[in-house]
Image (cartoon, rainbow, N blue to C red):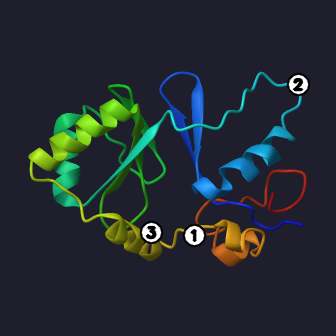
């Protein structure tokens, strides 16, 4: 029917693995949907909490982060790998990064940033940045309520009319 079931971030992790970040309440239904699309491929899908996430935003935290990690992605949507982490540059008016890795490594990095005086503004500020950047979010309550264009996915590079079995796939 062409309706959006989730807005997710696809992240290449260090090694031959990928992560699909989306709201926890959609993990099981999206997992089921994707399982039905795997045909004769060497693909294994798994649900889990083995990877932790840390969001870092702002000039000072960005500078502190670059002092701790050798490589940071420069453009929104780019991913860099450093010290067992996947670092994604997130769209927004100010520098924003999502860091994915093992819980112990993420906790240690968060502590280093906090101890260095680069603590962020918290979840409310991150959510405001997401809204300002025009990044949509779909939850169970509004799953399949929107067409991709209604969420501006065509303007955000999340929709292509040039590939797929039908326009907009």
| Secondary structure type for disc 1 | loop
x, y percent for residue 59:
20, 59
Tags 3 and 2 touching, CB below 8 Å: no
Give the quadrant of the C terminus. Answer: bottom right
Quarter location, residue 147: bottom right
Tell me residue 36's x, y (percent): 87, 41
For marks 3 and 1, the one nearer the N-term is 3
- Is residue 93 among what the camera can see? no
Q: What residue is drawn where x is 32% and y is 37%? A: 106
Q: Which residue is mark 3?
A: 130
Q: Which mark is residue 163?
A: none
Residue drawn at point x = 44 percent, y = 54 percent? 76
Residue linked to disc 1: 136
Horizontally, residue 166 falls left or right of residue 162, namely right
- Residue 19, how many percent across, how many down? 57, 39
- For the residues labelled 3 and 1, the Cα–Cα distance comes to 8 Å
Looking at this view, is 25 or 164 the one in front?
A: 25
User: Who is closer to the viewer here, 90 or 6?
Assistant: 6
Q: Is residue 72 left or right of residue 151?
A: left
Q: Assess disc 2: are there few (<14), some (14-19) or many (≥20) residues with their C-alpha within 10 Å of its C-alpha.
A: few
Q: Earlier in the sequence, mark 2 or mark 1?
A: 2
Q: Residues within 10 Å of mark 1 (few under 14, many from 20)?
A: some
Please name whichever residue, 120 or 140, is drawn nearer the observer in this view of the structure.
140
Q: CA distance from mark 3 to mark 2?
A: 37 Å
Q: Nearer the viewer, residue 160 or 59?
A: 59
Instruction: Left or right? Give the position of 143 relative to 58.
Output: right
Q: Is residue 21 visible?
A: yes
State the image quarter where residue 99 is shown: top left
* Residue of label 2: 40
């Amino acid at each position: 029917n062409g309706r959006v079931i989730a807005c997710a971030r696809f992240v290449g992790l260090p090694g031959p693995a990928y992560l699909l970040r989306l709201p926890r309440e959609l993990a099981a239904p999206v997992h089921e949907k994707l399982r039905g699309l795997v045909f004769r491929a060497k693909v294994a899908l798994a649900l889990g909490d083995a990877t932790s996430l840390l969001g870092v935003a702002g000039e000072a935290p960005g500078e502190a982060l670059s002092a701790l990690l050798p490589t940071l992605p420069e453009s929104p949507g780019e991913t860099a790998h450093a010290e067992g982490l996947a670092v994604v540059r997130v769209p927004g008016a100010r520098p924003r990064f999502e860091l994915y890795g093992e819980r112990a490594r993420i906790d240690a990095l968060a502590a280093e940033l906090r101890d260095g005086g680069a603590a962020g503004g918290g979840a409310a500020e991150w959510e405001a940045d997401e809204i300002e950047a025009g990044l949509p979010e779909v939850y169970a309550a509004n799953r399949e309520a929107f067409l991709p264009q209604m969420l501006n996915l065509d303007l955000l590079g999340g929709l292509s009319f040039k590939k797929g079995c039908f326009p907009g796939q």
